[in-house]
């Protein structure tokens, strides 16, 4: 399938093209300013789908309105010249519900495309979007999310009010646009985002900034929070990295905390010298995994009220994991001649005040 994307180099266009790269049978024709000014009909020839995302968001209101209508008029003329009967999906805005020049320009653009579809036998989807944010967005232009992330990454402290906004990530928009193509959905389609206040948005981003500064990935179990975190950290790249971690050393070897997140737990990497044993404790609630990635080890477990010891021989040559059951004391011993490298993961962050780690030897006493 041949698919054209106008505004291909803008924030939403970039995300849509990235989404479509997963489809081997989709050929994307990116249309930017040069293509608009050149043989646009030739670019559109053979395209079964056209995503019309090109537009102006900020600037002098009259210029913004004129530009948006002019771009659509140019597109309609090129579609007619190409004899196209494509499915055109237009990125409109909730601003059409407001009495503004920008909203009026979006309404007018939709009318032009709807009339073209009626004349040509093509299909038209007027996709009404809330505020869209995404990595690569320009601060003070694309979205308030981009502006806040830019400011926070620079160490600034923006302010916010309690006005309500509605936001959606560009990849979610891309998924929904492609679904409309597959389902041949036409007419006006209102895409719902997440409603919150500007203050709530800022406070969420500030919480993520502070958590990440402590080497902890914030709670990203909610997809919207995940999208906000991806947006924030995109403004830290590349200057923020690499980030050094604290390496803890003792006679047994070394250990460092690789990953910490309240929504995904905590991972440790350790080295253990030959003949050394780690562990000899049990948990009452934690989910814990041992995975040897280098060297030779024995993992031993015993129910705290039993006497039978279960022994697993594991090797980095065939990485294998053992998930530790609760109420079982356990340890791991380097039984090889080289350094043992082990990844440990648990579902919760270590809390010294409530560690759920009770010392008890594996060998029955």
Image: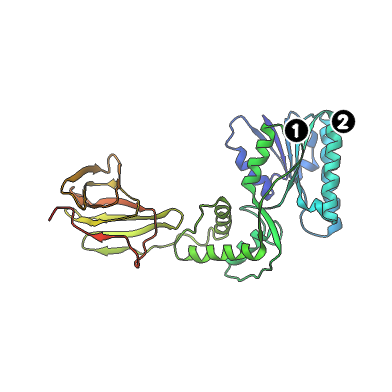
Q: Is residue 20 left or right of residue 37?
A: left
Image check: 142 left or right of 122? left
| Mark 2: few/some/many CA within 10 Å (<14, 14-19, 20+) | few
Q: How far apart are the alpha carbons under marks 2 and 1?
A: 13 Å
- Residue located 80% across and 43% down the image: 37
The quarter in which the N terminus is drawn is top right
Q: Say how many tags the image has.
A: 2
Judge whether 355 appears above or below 76 on screen.
Answer: below
Q: Quadrant of residue 203?
A: bottom right
Foreground residue, 162 or 317?
A: 162
**The residue positioned farthest toward the front in the image shown:** 305
Residue at 27 percent across and 43 percent down: it is 316
Q: Which quadrant holds residue 127?
A: top right
Q: Secondary structure at mark 1?
A: strand
Disc 2 secondary structure class: helix
Q: Which part of the image, by quadrant, shows the C terminus?
A: bottom left
Q: Is residue 148 above or below residue 129?
A: below
Residue 153 visible in rendering: no
- Label 1: few (<14), some (14–19) or many (≥20) C-alpha neighbours in 10 Å: many
Q: Position of residue 119 (x, y in %)?
A: 87, 30
Image quadrant where residue 265 sits: bottom left
- The residue identified by callout 2 is 119
Which is nearer the eye, 354 or 34?
354
Residue 185's tag is none
142 to the left or right of 296: right
The one of 106 and 39 positioned closer to us in this rendering: 106
Q: Nearer the viewer, residue 289 or 58?
A: 289
Q: Earlier in the sequence, mark 2 or mark 1?
A: 1
- The reply to whether discs 2 and 1 touch (Cβ–Cβ < 8 Å) is no
* Residue 87: image tag: 1
Residue 114 percent location from the top left of the image: 84, 37
């Amino acid at each position: 399938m041949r698919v054209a994307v106008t505004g291909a180099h803008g924030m939403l266009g970039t995300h849509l093209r990235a989404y479509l790269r997963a489809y081997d049978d989709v050929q994307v024709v990116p249309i930017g300013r040069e293509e608009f000014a050149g043989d646009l009909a030739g670019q559109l020839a053979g395209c079964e789908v056209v995503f019309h995302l090109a537009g102006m968001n900020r600037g002098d209101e009259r210029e913004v309105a004129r530009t948006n209508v002019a771009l659509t008029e140019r597109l309609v003329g090129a579609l007619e010249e190409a004899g196209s009967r494509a499915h055109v999906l237009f990125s409109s805005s909730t601003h059409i519900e407001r009495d503004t020049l920008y909203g009026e320009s979006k309404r007018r653009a939709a009318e032009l495309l709807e009339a073209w579809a009626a004349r040509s036998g093509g299909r038209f989807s007027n996709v009404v979007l809330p505020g869209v944010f995404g990595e690569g967005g320009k601060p003070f232009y694309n979205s308030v999310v981009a502006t806040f992330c830019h400011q926070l990454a620079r160490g600034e402290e923006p302010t916010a009010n309690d006005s309500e906004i509605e936001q959606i990530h560009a990849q979610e928009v891309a998924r929904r646009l492609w679904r409309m193509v597959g389902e041949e959905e036409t007419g006006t389609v209102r895409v719902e985002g997440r409603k919150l206040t500007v203050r709530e948005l800022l406070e969420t981003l500030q919480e993520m900034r502070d958590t990440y500064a402590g080497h902890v990935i914030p709670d990203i179990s909610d997809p919207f929070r995940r999208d906000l975190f991806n947006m924030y950290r995109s403004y830290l790249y590349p200057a923020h990295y690499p980030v050094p971690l604290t390496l803890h050393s003792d006679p047994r070897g070394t250990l460092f905390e690789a990953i910490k997140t309240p929504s995904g737990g905590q991972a440790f990497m350790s080295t253990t010298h030959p003949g050394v044993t780690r562990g000899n404790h049990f948990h009452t609630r934690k989910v814990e995994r041992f995975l040897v990635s280098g060297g030779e080890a024995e993992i031993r477990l015993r129910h705290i009220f039993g006497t039978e010891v279960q022994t697993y021989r594991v090797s980095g040559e065939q990485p294998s994991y053992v998930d530790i059951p609760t109420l079982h004391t356990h340890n791991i011993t380097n039984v090889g001649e080289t350094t043992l490298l082990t990844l440990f993961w648990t579902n919760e962050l270590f809390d010294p005040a409530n560690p759920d780690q009770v010392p008890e030897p594996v060998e029955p006493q």
